[in-house]
Image (cartoon, rainbow, N blue to C red):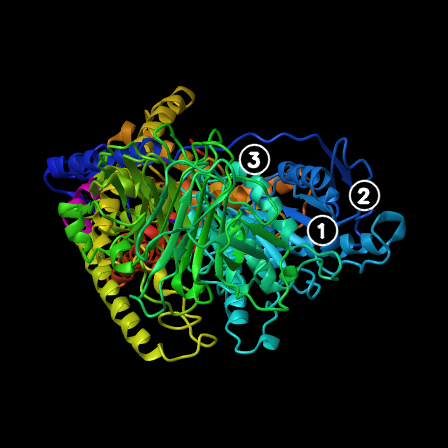
């Protein structure tokens, strides 16, 4: 090739004022604009990290769990059953001292660990299941007759596979697990390996419990060719990212997610159940909330995947008697959470059925009972479906509360001789809409036949008729005494509908504390009480106690406050309300404008004055309804409010719903205090900054490539015009004055335009689709067009368009820092290299001819390249080759920097700046390739050598290899002064635009775009038609007639 010390450019092309030439070629150049931008960027980055680590943090309330684990490995689950037998293993858990027999005996449950997870993570859940059955259920005749048997927990050892980064690994695990289910079910068919009653049907399905990516693997199993129909009907996931992949660095994981999610949406969009292969499947997603810093809990949402008849998403802070968030790993061992999960599983099993579970509707009812607060709209009340089982006989002059009055008992046990009943008349139907009954007490509510302190029943008059027997009632509660006149009431007990609320007193600190008994709460809409005339509150305490009761009927106009205030006004002025002195026991404040997961707030409740002493301290519940996230604050004065509402990049809901209800605040306060209460809410700006990290982590991999592409574009423009290839630092200086502000401004305008278009399309779609039956309604645009959320920052709200320049500043600062770090590393290595190879002393050594600059001969380079391509096509993924190329490029930059510094020639500085810029580009592509490389290394560690077909495409790495090899010989890219230069300009601009618009969702494509750029640069390098004849002959003269490269002097 050419003798590149001349850079293919006439000497006059680089002549000019020495000061300008020195500034352009200076690798360390830094303008005032760059310095200010970097400081601003790092200032914002520091505030975001500081906020993420120290502001708006949920309190950790998990208690430790304990167990005595024992595992039995199934060595006979070998290659005859699955092709992955040499890589993965199947285990059965047994609790020491309880389950010593490794034969199966109950209902199979398969635990799937997550990304880099261990099969041993099943221990807390399996141990709790063993103890609960051993200590409780096996002694309960009713549970035994209802089909309750022990849970046989199986777990899989994936050798800590990294599934979050690699789609093929996810598919391999799903295939293996389907094989494992067939093997597990066969155990129950084998008498020698089963202790089950022979009269019970053999199991035909397995319950799936998946943690993290294990939840996604579980859903993938149902789409695999080796899935055994109906072998899975219940899936419960913990902190699983269902809606979108945690990272998008691997094309396979992105395509797998799309294929699986489309399959589930398609199935549940069928009009008839017979056409839905998932009709029998229930899917419950449990999320940890803000404490989960591994996977954004927004991604656990099922709103875009399944209808509420088949599944829902709930946060651990909402689960009764848990009431705390938890991190990504704690959700598997947290004592409170594992108890709820295990009891829910026992509630839905039935060994008398081949499926081993109750029908779908009953399973959903059981999961709602155990996982939801009971305050949600979909919570089902048992009262309307009961028959009266208690006959209550009262004196005619029993305590009757006047219509519209509130029942307040500040101390139970007023009547020591016998229980005392208080009757609240049920308002007649037709009273103001939205009327509801509420009751709050710090005592537990008795079920029929229990002898506690308090019982609540809903009654209707039972007429005295001759021949009518009272034996229809299982309970007869006679409180009439010796009175001649009496009233008989047929009553239903309300204990089965009680809602547990965390205790809130002046001494309460956190909702998850167990040092106080939870409050008992009842809430019924008036429509649920149509067949009843009275609410009977029976005080059964035999002595004075600290127990208290508040009960009332309230109207929606008094108990629900709608705040019609826009987000901008809330940001500028905050929200301030005064709740009146005469207010209901429970007040709901609904603020539809507050729905974004990117904002956090601070709430303050003014302390109310209570002359007689308050029965309980204010209790606050913050909640949203699109996913079931509730957080409780006890003894509340100040509270940090953050939510998982509308989140970036999240697909729209599965079915057309009402507009997002936004944030709601439910406040229980002592109504006897007769004093007003101040409520103030304001945005926590610094606290909100921390919410950006979990939602926008991938932005810091995509936006820097926008900046690098724009800088390269500027460098090539100047080079083609003047012959000077400016340094990356100077190119960044120039871009900050021109193209980068324009680019981020244009992206901001595009974000606003897209948000407006989406909003208009959504409104139009809803207005045209509101009449469609629910079975065929899709999302706001198209049931299967879920790509609108993938652009730019993934938000439909134009308010957040300011985040584009904010992230632009941060990423610019990071690019500047990375550039100078690479320069420092290059400088240090060049100093070390100088110790090995002294500075050039002869004119020949200052030339970058291939014979002088290259460290190997042409033949050696060709052989090395062929071997590398052969390995990529057969044994190693191209990501490994890419890492090797990065190392080679570092070495090229070190030699180029030393040569430029030693000779001080413009041509050598041109080459070094060009090589350095290519290295910067490769460094920003490197994070996209590293995860797959880590997966490959993990597979080598477990001796799994099966190649991944998608990662052995030599075309994905060949242009990089050719460019890096070309640069390693010291060849400079020739100037292009024809119209062809426009292609370079357009190509780099296209890469920048793609990185900004689609880089977050499809980050893996950025590698291929950079690969195309390298192919184009290689084309320019070897386009000899553009070279002068003299330079071509010079190149040919460097090779001997025999074809051997000349040796160095």
Tell me where residue 1015 sits by quadrant: bottom left
Alpha carbon distance from label 3 to label 2: 32 Å
Reading the image, the residue beneath label 3 is 335
Reading the image, the residue beneath label 1 is 142
Is the residue marked by circle 2 packed among few (<14), some (14-19), or many (20+) residues within 10 Å? few
Reading the image, the residue beneath label 2 is 75
Nearest-to-viewer mark from 1 and 2: 1
Q: Position of residue 894 (x, y in %)?
A: 37, 32
Q: Is residue 154 left or right of residue 856?
A: right
Nearest-to-viewer mark from 3 and 2: 3
Secondary structure at numbered mark 1: helix
Secondary structure at numbered mark 3: helix
Alpha carbon distance from label 3 to label 1: 26 Å
Residue 852 seen in the current view: no
Name the residue: 58% across, 64% down. 361
Does 312 sit above or below residue 240? below
Return the residue found at the far top. Answer: 835
Tell me the quadrant of the picture where the C terminus can be found: top left
Q: Earlier in the sequence, mark 3 or mark 2?
A: 2
In magenta stretch: residue 733: yes
**395 or 714: which is nearer to us?**
395
Which range is magenta? 730-740
Tell me where residue 442 sits by quadrant: top left
In magenta stretch: residue 815: no
Return the residue found at the far right. Answer: 192
**87 or 440: which is nearer to us?**
440
Residue 1041's mark? none
Q: Position of residue 237 (x, y in %)?
A: 55, 50
Q: Is residue 217 left or right of residue 794?
A: right
């Amino acid at each position: 090739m050419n003798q590149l010390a001349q850079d293919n450019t006439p000497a006059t092309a680089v002549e000019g004022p020495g000061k300008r030439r020195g500034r352009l070629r200076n690798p360390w150049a830094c303008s005032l604009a760059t310095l200010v931008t970097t400081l601003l960027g790092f200032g914002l980055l520091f505030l975001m990290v500081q906020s993420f680590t120290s502001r708006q943090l949920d309190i950790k309330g998990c208690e430790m769990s304990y167990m005595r684990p024992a595992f039995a490995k199934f060595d006979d689950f070998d290659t005859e059953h699955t092709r992955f037998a040499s890589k993965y293993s199947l285990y059965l858990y047994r609790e020491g001292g309880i389950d010593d027999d490794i034969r199966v005996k109950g209902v199979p449950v398969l635990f799937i660990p997550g990304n880099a997870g261990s099969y041993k993570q099943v221990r807390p859940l399996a141990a709790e299941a063993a103890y609960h059955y051993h200590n409780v259920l096996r002694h309960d005749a009713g549970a035994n007759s209802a089909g309750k048997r022990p849970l046989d927990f199986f777990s899989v050892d994936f050798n800590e596979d990294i599934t979050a980064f690699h789609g093929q690994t996810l598919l391999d695990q799903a295939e293996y697990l389907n094989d494992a289910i067939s093997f597990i079910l066969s155990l129950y068919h084998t008498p020698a390996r089963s202790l089950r009653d022979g009269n019970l049907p053999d199991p035909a399905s397995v319950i799936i419990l998946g943690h993290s990516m294990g939840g996604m693997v579980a859903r993938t199993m149902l789409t695999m060719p080796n899935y055994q129909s109906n072998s899975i009907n219940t899936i419960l996931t913990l902190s699983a990212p269902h809606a979108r992949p945690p990272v998008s660095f691997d094309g396979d994981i992105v395509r797998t997610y799309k294929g699986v999610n489309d399959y589930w949406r398609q199935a549940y969009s069928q009009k008839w159940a017979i056409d839905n292969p998932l009709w029998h499947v229930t899917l419950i997603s449990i999320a940890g909330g803000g404490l989960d810093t591994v996977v954004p809990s927004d991604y656990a949402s099922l709103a875009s995947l399944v209808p509420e008849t088949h599944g829902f998403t709930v946060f651990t802070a909402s689960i009764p008697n848990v009431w705390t968030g938890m991190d990504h790993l704690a959700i598997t061992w947290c004592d409170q959470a594992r108890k709820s999960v295990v009891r829910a599983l026992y509630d839905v099993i039935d060994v008398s059925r081949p499926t081993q579970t109750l029908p779908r509707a009953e399973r959903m009812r059981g999961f709602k009972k155990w996982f939801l607060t009971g305050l949600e709209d979909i919570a089902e009340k048992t009262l309307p479906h009961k028959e009266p089982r208690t006959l209550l006989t009262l004196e005619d002059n029993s305590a009757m509360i006047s219509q519209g009055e509130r029942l307040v008992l500040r101390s139970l046990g007023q009547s020591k001789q016998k229980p005392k009943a208080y009757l609240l008349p049920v308002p007649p139907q037709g009273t103001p809409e939205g009327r509801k009954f509420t009751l709050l007490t710090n005592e537990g509510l008795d079920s029929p036949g229990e002898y506690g302190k308090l019982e609540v029943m809903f009654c209707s008059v039972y007429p005295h008729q001759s021949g009518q027997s009272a034996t229809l009632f299982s309970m007869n509660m006679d409180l009439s005494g010796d009175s001649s006149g009496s009233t008989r009431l047929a009553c239903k007990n309300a204990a089965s509908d009680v809602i547990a609320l965390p205790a809130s007193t002046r001494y309460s600190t956190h909702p998850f504390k167990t040092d106080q008994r939870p409050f008992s709460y009842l809430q019924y809409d008036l429509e649920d009480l149509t067949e009843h005339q009275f609410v009977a509150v029976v005080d059964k305490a035999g002595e004075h106690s600290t127990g208290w009761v508040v009960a009332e009927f309230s109207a929606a106009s008094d108990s629900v406050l709608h705040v019609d205030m826009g987000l901008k006004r809330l940001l500028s002025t905050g929200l301030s309300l005064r709740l009146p002195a005469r207010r209901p026991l429970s007040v709901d404040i609904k603020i539809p404008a507050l729905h974004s997961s990117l904002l956090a707030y601070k709430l303050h409740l003014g302390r109310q004055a209570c002359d007689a002493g308050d029965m309980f301290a204010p209790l606050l519940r913050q909640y949203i309804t699109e996913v079931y996230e509730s957080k409780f604050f006890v003894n509340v004065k100040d509270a940090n409010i953050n939510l998982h509402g509308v989140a970036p990049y999240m697909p729209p809901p599965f079915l057309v719903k009402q507009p997002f209800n936004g944030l709601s605040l439910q406040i229980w306060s002592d109504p006897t205090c007769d004093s007003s209460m101040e409520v103030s809410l304001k945005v926590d700006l610094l606290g909100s900054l921390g919410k950006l990290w979990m939602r926008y982590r991938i932005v810091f991999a995509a936006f820097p490539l926008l900046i690098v592409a724009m800088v390269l574009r500027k460098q090539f423009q100047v080079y083609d015009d003047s012959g000077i290839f400016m340094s990356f630092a100077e190119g960044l200086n120039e871009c900050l004055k021109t193209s980068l502000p324009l680019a981020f401004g244009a992206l901001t305008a595009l974000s606003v335009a897209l948000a407006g278009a989406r909003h208009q399309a959504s409104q139009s779609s809803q207005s045209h689709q509101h009449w469609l039956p629910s079975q065929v309604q899709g999302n706001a645009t198209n049931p299967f067009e879920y790509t609108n959320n993938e652009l730019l920052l993934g938000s439909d709200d134009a308010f957040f368009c300011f985040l584009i320049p904010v992230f632009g500043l941060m990423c610019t600062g990071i690019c500047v820092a990375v550039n100078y770090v690479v320069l420092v590393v290059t400088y240090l290595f060049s100093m070390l290299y100088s110790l090995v190879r002294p500075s050039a002393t002869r004119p020949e050594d200052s030339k970058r001819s291939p014979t002088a600059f290259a460290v190997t001969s042409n033949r050696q380079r060709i052989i090395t390249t062929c071997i590398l391509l052969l390995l990529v096509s057969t044994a190693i993924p191209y990501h490994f080759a890419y890492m090797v190329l990065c190392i080679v490029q570092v070495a090229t930059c070190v030699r180029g920097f030393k040569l430029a510094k030693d000779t001080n020639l413009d041509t050598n500085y041109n080459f070094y700046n060009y090589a350095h810029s290519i290295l910067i580009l490769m460094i920003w592509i490197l994070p996209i390739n590293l995860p797959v490389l880590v997966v490959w290394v993990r597979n080598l560690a477990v001796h799994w050598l099966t190649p991944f077909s998608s990662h052995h495409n030599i075309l994905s790495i060949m242009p990089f290899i050719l460019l890096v090899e070309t640069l390693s010989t010291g060849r400079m890219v020739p100037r292009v002064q024809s119209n062809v230069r426009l292609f370079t300009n357009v190509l780099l601009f296209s890469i920048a635009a793609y990185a900004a618009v689609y880089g977050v969702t499809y980050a893996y494509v950025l590698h291929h775009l950079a690969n195309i750029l390298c192919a184009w640069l290689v084309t320019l390098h070897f386009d000899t038609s553009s070279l002068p004849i003299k330079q071509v002959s010079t190149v040919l003269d460097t090779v001997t007639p025999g074809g051997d490269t000349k040796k160095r002097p």
